Image (spheres, rainbow, N blue to C red):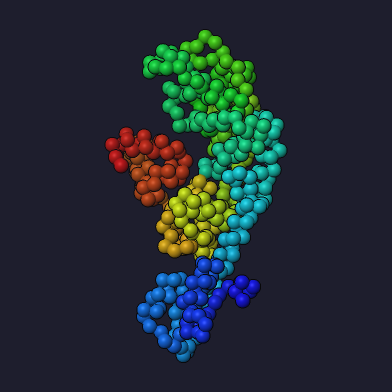
Amino acid sequence: MVEHEDPDIVISDVVMPETSGLELLKKLKSGDPHRPVLLITAQGSIDMAVEAMKQGARDFLTKPLTDFPKLKSLLDDAEREIELRRKAKRLTTRIEVEAGSGEFVGTSKAMREVFALIESVAERDVPVMITGESGTGKEVAARTIHRLSRREGKPFVAINAAAIPESLIESELFGHERGSFTGAVATRQGVFEQANGGTLLIDEIAEMPMSLQPKLLRVLADGRVRRLGGNYEFEFDVRVLASTNRDPTKAIEEARLREDLYYRLNVVPLSLPPLRARAEDIPLLVQHFINEFNVKHRLQIMGATDEAMAMLRAYPWPGNVRELRNITERSVVLAKGEWIEENALPPYVRSPALRAEKLVFSVGETTVAEAERELILRTLEHAGKNKAEAARQLGVDVKTIYNKLKAYGIEE
């Protein structure tokens, strides 16, 4: 009967003519380990109850069955869990069938437009300028363009213009010959040579030193690069993508980005929406990350409860998809059972009061440096000493936080 009807819940006696409820429980669990089973007996004992629970019984009730509110409560709980499992299965199916491209996940109108643009531009081999807030997936978008292009299988190289010291970035871009400067103990290829035949992503292009941007523009225009200290130019075949979390037009106005370089790179603009603008994608993303972290941490988390998911959808996500991914991993690791519940989420996600709290302090007649120090330290405290989160709240690179703390003489 179980094989034909596939019941959601089974309520069984323990003492029966041809088999015992415990034997039946073993067979039911071998067929579907998640099916809730309630056992009932007039001959209940502590030992039998313990054995039944060990083998996976949902609960153990004794006859005569008079506590019907308890039975209804158990059935209601089981029904809620069954529905959660069905939701998780539906989400996983949507992720596999319709939710995105590569590492991108989403079925919202905004993301469907992003997918369509990526698919149409991937084969065209033109420069793309990818814009969006920190954490929206700009590098993921670049990797997806590369994966869908004719250059798939060739190198994909990413360089972050904001993360490399100004004294080294020219060498990283163009390479150098041995002895071309102090510390150049060996010849080094630049990223254009490393990415030859493939795709190069210049991340945070608006943070590149202005003195270097004309050199980059000339290299892009000529299709040839010369290493620092070198005598020869190398031809390269590289598709160049660029990204920034700034508004490029404002970066031009603020003299952070050369206008001619911008137009060279902005043949096709691709804008990634913030997560708060596509909250309907959050359940899909959460399930996608749960599946990923189940493999990474060898766990079997089924999904998030409705209450936890409601909190995740209500949170404004200043760190966007990157923040959601980190919080999901944290929640997967801290989950007490098969489901992510509210208590596995960070306090600032659970509490609207903490999210709404303003960081206010009196400046008085303090210096700019002292005010900056106070702001950074207060923001770190507010972010639970999470430097990446503090950097996001302040709108700076996390390296800036580390450097400032070092300057203040504050160790880990």
Vertical relation: 18 (above or below) 411? below
Vertical relation: 60 (above or below) 406? below
Tell me what residue is drawn at x 55 percent, y 73 percent.
79
- Name the residue at the front extreme: 18
Tell me what residue is drawn at x 56 percent, y 31 percent.
156
Q: Is residue 107 visible?
A: no
Tell me what residue is drawn at x 50 percent, y 80 percent.
19
310 lies left or right of 371: right
In the picture, residue 164 is in which quadrant?
Answer: top left
In the picture, residue 142 is in which quadrant?
Answer: top right
Query: Residue 406's spot in the image, x, y percent?
Result: 32, 35
Query: Residue 358's spot in the image, x, y percent?
Result: 43, 52
| Quadrant of the rendering where the N terminus is positioned | bottom right
- Name the residue at the top extreme: 231
Tell me what residue is drawn at x 41 percent, y 57 percent.
334
Q: Nearer the viewer, residue 203 or 261?
A: 203
103 lies left or right of 370: right
Q: Is residue 94 visible?
A: yes
Query: Residue 24's spot in the image, x, y percent?
Result: 51, 76
Query: Residue 196's spot in the image, x, y percent?
Result: 58, 24
